[in-house]
Amino acid sequence: MHNAKTIVKTTNPALLPPFKGIARPVIVSAVFFMLLTGIGYPLATTGVANLLFPDQAQGSLIVNDGKVVGSRQIGQHFTRMEYFHSRPSATVGADPADPSRTIDQPYNAAASGASNQGAISKKLLAAVDERTRTYRAVNGLATDVAVPVDAVTASASGLDPHVSVANARLQAPRVARARGLPVGQVLRLVDQHTHARQLGLLGDPRVNVLELNLALDAAAPARPAAQ
């Protein structure tokens, strides 16, 4: 009588498919973290932000006469003499005449960025020199009057909504003349729209240009632009 032999089949691990056994947990974890970080987390942070900081969460919008005219966080380009001017901006945009080329478009919020020119760049130094001469000429300043650095340099984003207090005060006489207002009244508006350092420590006192110009329009409407 022969003893029964038990045949046990063994599988060589080297012959197993390389991802057998791990495909399911990999897919499950990928889907889980996609839902968590792609849907759950954004919804949670958006909900908390709207609950605690509704104005900031909605873009810090500025409404004038029932219409949204801008944001407190994004500057605008002003050139007329009766308005305070923002600091220079290095943003660019597509040339309407030739979309394959770019042209200067100050405060283009769709293309935030800086010039990336170094402190010893000849192009930057020439631009600062030209801006300094233009600033003095526009504001009726003597050639020996110091010009604030923010008046002749662009911010890293190109969208800075603020100017320094010194910059705003140097522009005040020009704005007052253009509007037919006493300089003292314009300077008081500058003071009323000066923001202190954040938490009393961070940054410098600053003036939001759009808010200040809207206050000017409320105090003395700007004259219609020449046709």
Image: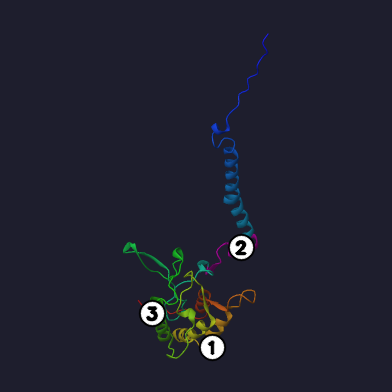
Identify the amino acid type marked 3: Ala
Residue at x-position 44% and y-position 85%: 139
Q: Is residue 52 magenta?
A: yes
Relative to 38, say whether 66 is above or below: below
Q: Which residue in the protein does label 3 denote?
A: 126
**Which quarter of the figure is the N terminus placed in?**
top right
Which residue is at 59% across, 51% downward? Answer: 37
Q: For the residue marked with disc 1, what is the amino acid? A: Gly
**10 Å neighbourhood of mark 3: few (<14), some, or many (≥20)?**
few
Q: Which residue is mark 2?
A: 54
Residue at image mark 1? 184
Q: Nearer the viewer, residue 209 or 131?
A: 131
Residue 202 visible somewhere in the drawing: yes
Other-residue count near label 1 (Cα within 10 Å), few / some / many at <14 / 14–19 / ≥20:
few
3 or 1: mark nearer the eye: 3
Q: Judge depth for marks 1 and 2 and give the one in front.
A: 2
In space, the residues marked 2 and 3 are separated at their CA atoms by: 44 Å
Residue range corresponding to the magenta coloring = 51-65
Picture residue at 44% right of the left edge, 74% below the top: 118
Q: Amino acid at mark 2?
A: Pro
Q: Is residue 98 left or right of residue 217?
A: left
Residue 99, given in percent of the width and then of the height, sits at 34, 61
Q: Is residue 42 magenta?
A: no
